Amino acid sequence: MRLSTEYSATIAEILASAEEQTGVVWSLQESGDLNVNLVQFAEGEGVGEHLNDEVDVLFVGVSGSGEVRINGTLHGLSSGTLILIPKGAQRSTRSISANFAYLTVHQRRGPLKIRVPRRDQE
């Protein structure tokens, strides 16, 4: 689903249209300055640890509950929670409930590539 100046949608509508899809389920296409991604995971899924080496990233909790690990420190992420992940930090995310979703917002860079690790690799 794309958002433009002629169209708007609620996050709930976007998530409902994504059904069982996991990973990035929506991205803002119309901004030349910002990357905004809506990410959704089933319970136990997430993004493995990696270096946040390009830009500061703001996480905004949308639904469900999850964990964000930043340089080894665990933070809870749920609806309405904001977490800033600074450039240069090690980070990972993991859903601890069904329907865990969050937005990532940062300065525009290349396309986002999220891999969902297999459950046997945790």
Image: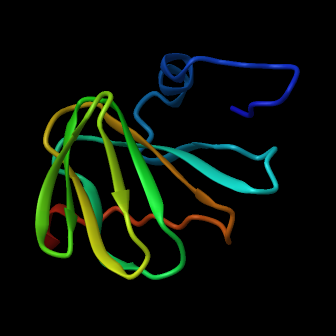
Query: Picture quarter containing residue 98?
Result: top left
Give the left or right position of residue 78, taking residue 102 as reference. Answer: left
Q: Quadrant of the C terminus?
A: bottom left
| Residue 51 percent location from the top left of the image | 36, 81
Query: Picture quarter containing residue 3?
Result: top right
* Residue at the extreme right of the image, as rendered: 6
**What's the residue at 44%, 53% (across, down)?**
58
Query: Picture quarter containing residue 102?
Result: top left
In the image, residue 47 above or below residue 63: below
In the image, residue 103 above or below residue 3: below
**What's the residue at 34%, 61% (across, down)?**
116
Q: How is the image coloured?
A: rainbow
| Residue 104 percent location from the top left of the image | 48, 50
**What's the residue at 45%, 27% (across, down)?**
19
Q: Quadrant of the N terminus?
A: top right
**What's the residue at 16%, 61% (across, down)?**
119
For the image shown, how many numbered marks are present on the structure? 0
Give the left or right position of residue 24, taking residue 7 as reference. Answer: left
| Residue 53 percent location from the top left of the image | 46, 82
Give the left or right position of residue 30, taking residue 19 as reference. Answer: right
In the image, residue 58 above or below residue 87: above
